[in-house]
Image (spheres, rainbow, N blue to C red):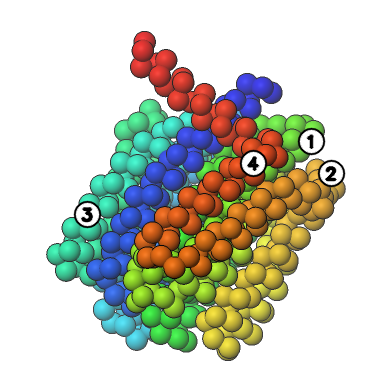
Amino acid sequence: MSENKTQISTNVIWRLAERFGAQGVSFVVSVVLARLIAPEVYGTIALITVLTNILNVFVQSGLSTAIIQKRDSDDLDMATVFTFNIVMSIVLYAILFAVSPLISDFYDKPDMTPVIRVMSVTILLGGINGIQQAYVSKRMQFKLFFKATIVGTIISAFIGIAMAYAGFGVWALVAQILSNQLMDTIILWCTIGWHPHIAFSFERFKPLYSFSWKVFVSNLIDTIYKNLRSLLIGKIYTESDLAFYNRGNHLPELVITNVNTSIQSVFFPAYASVSNDKVKLKELVRKSISSSTYIIFPCMAGLAAISNTLILVLYTDVWAAAVPYMWIACFSYAFWPMHTANLQVIQAMGRSDISLKLEIIKKTVTFICLIVSIRFGVLAVAMCAVPLAIFSLIVNAFPNRKLLDYSIKEQLVDIMPTIVMSLIMGACVVLTGLLPIPLIAKLFVQIIIGASVYILCSKLTHNSNYSYFKAKIKHIFSHKKNQEKK
């Protein structure tokens, strides 16, 4: 078990390094592009991204999760999933290509048609990239993700910024997105030492599909719901309203997606490997929730506290209307690590049926709230996300009270020290924001104060997560130095 813990912690660090490195570059690029490209252009890209996100769920169909969950998956399983993904991606791309004029007419934007057709090439790339990611995750070789993502992100950054400066507008964003995924796919193809090939076995597909269809429906419901807000806002209100809503969500979502995805993508195959041992499984889930919330909570509290200063410094007052959306997003995203950990452990135990039932319950309630709130404006839609996040957390955690003997009460007790430290840190940052100093200086001081207060609180309380991450980072750097000496 100790060897397994070491492997998990090392891969968590690599995954975090990959996501933060890539998104750090992407963040800088987004700041530059936001100053060069009008908000309504971002609204157009947001609408198209919604469509491609939904169709990519069909491409994956939960089969990548099934590959990771299956203990003895082999090359034929991989080839079967790859073949299915490729065929599905081609069919879906052809359909979207054909109906793109209808989508453009629906939003009364005829210029969207060529953009949809080009940007939806990401669906074809997803057919290849999905099985690559499953292969790497299954073997817990997350260092490869770091190399592929960093290189792809840097190359796409140069392409996006260069085209924006040249006045290509919306096509600069399209080129950045496409080149990023293309480079990621190419680099993984060249580095993982395994290449997918066309082969299909109905005998292998049946048990994989038996597990994956429930995951697929759950993911589809979740993806449609998460993107339905953007679809409705883009249709009922203006593209600028959608752009402000998405910009306010962008930074909190960027942090939560990358930290949470990094940690949970490493822990899920670990869950699956000990799914028959509830004691070890519960220990892993507790570690996952504890470590991820230790990073996420201060990030969300800090972002909320500096939101006004941050938006004005990075994007200028043109984007000031995004500030309240950022506040709301920080609070609604804070508990995501607990959401995903509870759902993933259920799937790792082979109970995708429970996962599907939970999604139906949650999304029925949230869909009703969305339909009611959309009548009262975009801000009302955003505000509904906070109580719905709490409701979803309770629903997700409920089955694990019996499956794992790990109740929501016990989970909250485990993360309470992190919540308290984050609130203290957030309060200090808000007070620092009252200083009558220039915006850039204020932002810098707020970040320094926030990080210092949180680290100080961690040291004073002898927080185990602080010691854990500190030790693992030291281990990785010392190991790298020893290798360089050799």
Q: Nearer the viewer, mark 1 or mark 3?
A: 3
Quarter of the figure with the C terminus: top left
* Nearest to N terminus: mark 2 or mark 4: 2
> What type is the residue that disc 4 sits on?
Ser
Q: Nearer the viewer, mark 4 or mark 1?
A: 4
For the residue pair 435 and 461, the one nearer the viewer reads as: 435
Residue highlighted by disc 4 = 458
> What type is the residue that disc 1 sits on?
Lys
On the question of residue 430 being in view, the answer is yes
> What type is the residue that disc 3 sits on?
Ile
Residue highlighted by disc 2 = 405
Residue highlighted by disc 3 = 159
On the question of residue 403 being in view, the answer is no
Residue highlighted by disc 1 = 278
Q: Residues within 10 Å of mark 3 (few under 14, many from 20)?
A: some
> Disc 1 vs disc 3: Cβ atoms closer than 8 Å?
no
* Nearest to N terminus: mark 4 or mark 3: 3
In this rendering, is residue 416 above or below 116? above
Cα distance in 3D space between marks 4 and 1? 30 Å
Q: Residues within 10 Å of mark 2 (few under 14, many from 20)?
A: few
> Disc 2 vs disc 3: Cβ atoms closer than 8 Å?
no
> Disc 2 vs disc 1: Cβ atoms closer than 8 Å?
yes
Task: Give me the disc on residue 194.
Answer: none
Q: Which secondary structure lies at badge 2?
A: loop
In this rendering, is residue 230 above or below 334? below
Cα distance in 3D space between marks 2 and 3? 51 Å
In this rendering, is residue 45 above or below 479? below
Cα distance in 3D space between marks 2 and 1? 9 Å
* Nearest to N terminus: mark 4 or mark 1: 1
Residue 123, how many percent across, how many down? 38, 57
Left or right: residue 223 compared with residue 93? right
